[in-house]
Amino acid sequence: MKFTKEQAVDYAVEVVGYLDRIVMGMEHNGRVCAVKGRKNELKDCFLARAKDMIFNATREQLEAAYDECGKADTIDHTVQAMFRVIGNKAPNPGNEKPIETVLFGIV
């Protein structure tokens, strides 16, 4: 099924709204990024900064990320690509491995 930029951005905004809730989480490069304040929360590293940028992404940032990454074959893959674009803009003074995979869903 084809989807529009507006549909993809609307879905991404909805996902961002759910990410800070207890049941939703994200995984970057195989590492689970727990919700802020949880004992498994990533702290003071590139992935932690990337997670924070994604968790706080605005509609405008998501639209720009959509334009930057283009379309994928499904809306979930497109939103994952949008999150990867946003997350990889996080400060990375230690030259840690950039985000290659982003998964989100119920944890």
Image (cartoon, rainbow, N blue to C red):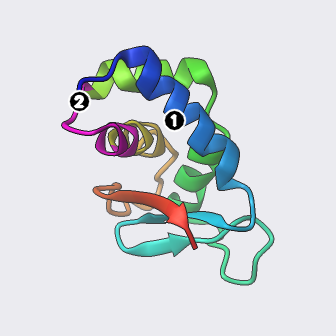
- Marks 2 and 1, how far apart at CA: 17 Å
- Whichever of labels 2 and 1 marks the residue nearer the N terminus, that label is 2
**Label 2: element kind:** loop
Circle 2 or circle 1, nearest the eye = 2
Q: Is residue 2 above or below residue 96?
A: above
Q: Is residue 30 left or right of residue 15?
A: left
Residue positioned 63% across, 71% down in the render:
34
Residue 70 at x, y = what percent? 25, 24
Q: Mark 1 = which residue?
A: 12
**On screen, 99 above or below 64?**
below
Whether the residues at callouts 2 and 1 have beta carbons within 8 Å, the answer is no
Residue 83, numbered circle: none
Category of crowding for the residue at label 2, using alpha-carbon neighbours closer than 10 angstroms: few (below 14), some (14–19), many (at least 20): few
Instruction: Return the residue found at the far bottom.
Output: 39
Identify the residue at horizontal 26%, vertical 39% (top origin).
74
> Split into 4 quadrants, where in the image is the C terminus?
bottom right
Is residue 91 toward the left or the right of residue 70 in the image? right
Residue occupying the point 41% across, 60% down = 103
Residue farthest to the left, as pictured: 73
Residue range highlighted in magenta: 70-80
Residue 39: horizontal and vertical position, in percent?
74, 83
Q: Which residue is mark 2?
A: 1
Residue at the limit of the structure toward the front, as seen here: 1
Q: Which amino acid, mark 1?
A: Ala
Does residue 53 show up?
A: no
Identify the amino acid type marked 2: Met
